[in-house]
Amino acid sequence: MSGVFLSVLTRELRLALRQGGDSLMVVAFFVVTVVLFPFGVGPEPAVLERISAGVLWVTALLASMLSLDRLFQQDYEDGSLDLLVRSSAPLSAVVIAKVAAHWLTSALPLIAAAPLLAVLLQMRGDGFAVLMAAMALGTPSLSLIGAVGAALVLGARRGGVLVSLLILPLSVPILIFGVSAVDAAVMGLSYAAQLKVLAAILLVTLALCPFATALALRQAVE
């Protein structure tokens, strides 16, 4: 299983490095959207500080969905997905490898850029580390849930819109506890409980989503 995981992960990372456009598009969307908020709500530092955690989390959620509809699309169109499904390799390991590659190329750059954008939004320094920790725990869950949605709409027209409609309601708990953790850190309160909930959500999604995605992929190629 580890051999399948590593080979698929390496392949996906190489493809992402060659294409590069998807990752840059995700980061550019994240940065540009956050930069627009001070123009929309005004430059008042108190207002920006109050909404900073929510703005960063909502924008990261929307940015991470930009490339989800193409998570399996290329493999579906060139027939390689059919070979993966019919091979003896565990399909759930293939799914985990593709989700890991998606997270490394899409979500990890967002986590790296988040503190810089938090400065623009006047967030207090106490929230920076918690923001990165919460996003590190929450964004893998978003990718895992997104993989289920991407597999369910595989081959459908307007798949990106359908993925968004499927994922957004399921992402609400991650959004709530992610923002709450940062707000608690900024106010000097304990944020351990929120991070533990995000970790628990990650464990649950890691246990369930790969198998649900694999089942949806098998149905898509049949």
Image (cartoon, grey):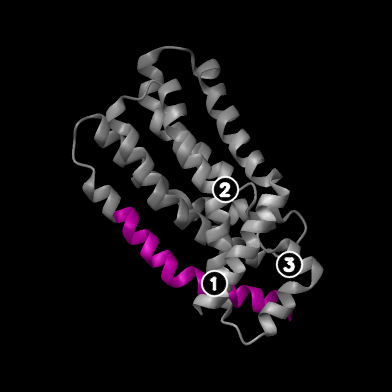
Query: Which dot marks residue 106?
Result: 2
Q: Is residue 110 above or below residue 100?
A: above
Residue furthest toward the left?
189
Q: CA distance from mark 3 to mark 2?
A: 19 Å
Residue bearing mark 1 = 5
Q: Amino acid at mark 2?
A: Ser
Q: CA distance from mark 1 to mark 2?
A: 19 Å
Residue bearing mark 3 = 75
Task: Give the left or right position of residue 44, taking residue 27 as reference.
Answer: left
Q: What range is drawn magenta here?
A: 197-222
- Which residue is at a point 41% across and 12% down the rendered structure image? 44
- Confirm whether the magenta stretch covers residue 170: no
Q: Earlier in the sequence, mark 3 or mark 1?
A: 1
Q: Can residue 173 be seen at all in this image of the molecule?
A: no
- Which residue is at a point 46% across and 50% down the rendered structure image? 139
- Which residue is at a point 55% across and 61% down the rendered structure image? 99
The one nearer the camera, 149 or 182, is 182
